[in-house]
Amino acid sequence: MLTTMKQPIQLAPSYLIWHKDVPLKVIIFVWRLIWNRLPTKDNLRNRGILSHENHLCVGGCRLEETSHHLFLSCPIFGSVWHHLRRWLGILGVDHMCLSDHFLQFGYLRSGYRRIRSTLILIWLACIWVLWKERNNKIFNKAMSIDEIVNKVKLSSFWWLKAKHVNFAFSYHNWWLTQMECLDIGM
């Protein structure tokens, strides 16, 4: 592969976001994110909806709010990924492109397809929770990083529990030993 001129086949993130266990509104939201169609401050400014002065991230980091910045490089919102990897017991670094970050997170742990599917589900839950928290910060109802991570855990648990009748684990089990739940439970 290194010596040939052929381009390797890459999975399109748009194919993987259509996850059967995730609510449709979240899938549509992530689809818009991948195509940079979210109403972030830079997109609103480019469309003439916001003034040039009102373009800073709501996290308080004094940088321009773009999709990339908000979800990956913001010191407030971007730090959630480290906490999630620690919860999952997985080492890794964040990719600086949203679609590559999505693919990388889904393949952080080798193993069964259901584990990869659940990692993608957790990524989708995190993106959704981060966007909702971004909107809450605009109206001064901010959560801490730990509360955001806990909300991601809770959302992913309920999405799995709603779609898999045989997912017999409690939220406490999911909280403490999520990978064991996946290895045994589904």
Image: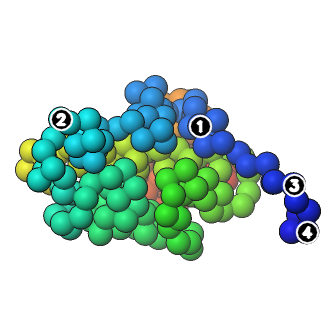
Q: CA distance from mark 3 to mark 4?
A: 9 Å
Q: Is residue 167 left or right of residue 66?
A: right
> Mark 4 sits on what residue?
3
Name the residue nearer the viewer: 46 or 91. Answer: 46
Q: CA distance from mark 1 to mark 2?
A: 28 Å
Which numbered disc covers residue 174? Answer: none
Q: Classify 10 Å Cα crowding around label 3: few (below 14), some (14-19), many (20 and above).
A: few
From this view, report whether residue 6 is shown above or below residue 14: below
Q: Secondary structure at mark 4?
A: loop
Q: CA distance from mark 2 to mark 3?
A: 44 Å
Name the residue nearer the viewer: 118 or 6. Answer: 6
Q: Classify 10 Å Cα crowding around label 2: few (below 14), some (14-19), many (20 and above).
A: few
Residue 27 in sight in this render: yes
From this view, report whether residue 163 is shown above or below residue 60: above
> Mark 1 sits on what residue?
14
Q: CA distance from mark 3 to mark 1?
A: 23 Å
> Mark 3 sits on what residue?
6
Q: Is residue 183 left or right of residue 127?
A: right
Quarter where residue 101 is shown? bottom right
Q: Whole-percent x and y of residue 32? A: 43, 34
Callout 4–callout 1 Cβ contact below 8 Å: no
> Mark 2 sits on what residue?
49
User: Which residue is drawn at the image coordinates 35% and 59% (left, top)?
Assistant: 69
For the N terminus, the quadrant is: bottom right
Q: Secondary structure at mark 1?
A: helix
Q: Is residue 61 left or right of residue 29?
A: left
Q: Whole-percent x and y of residue 138? A: 13, 47
Of mark 2 and mark 4, the one earlier in the sequence is 4
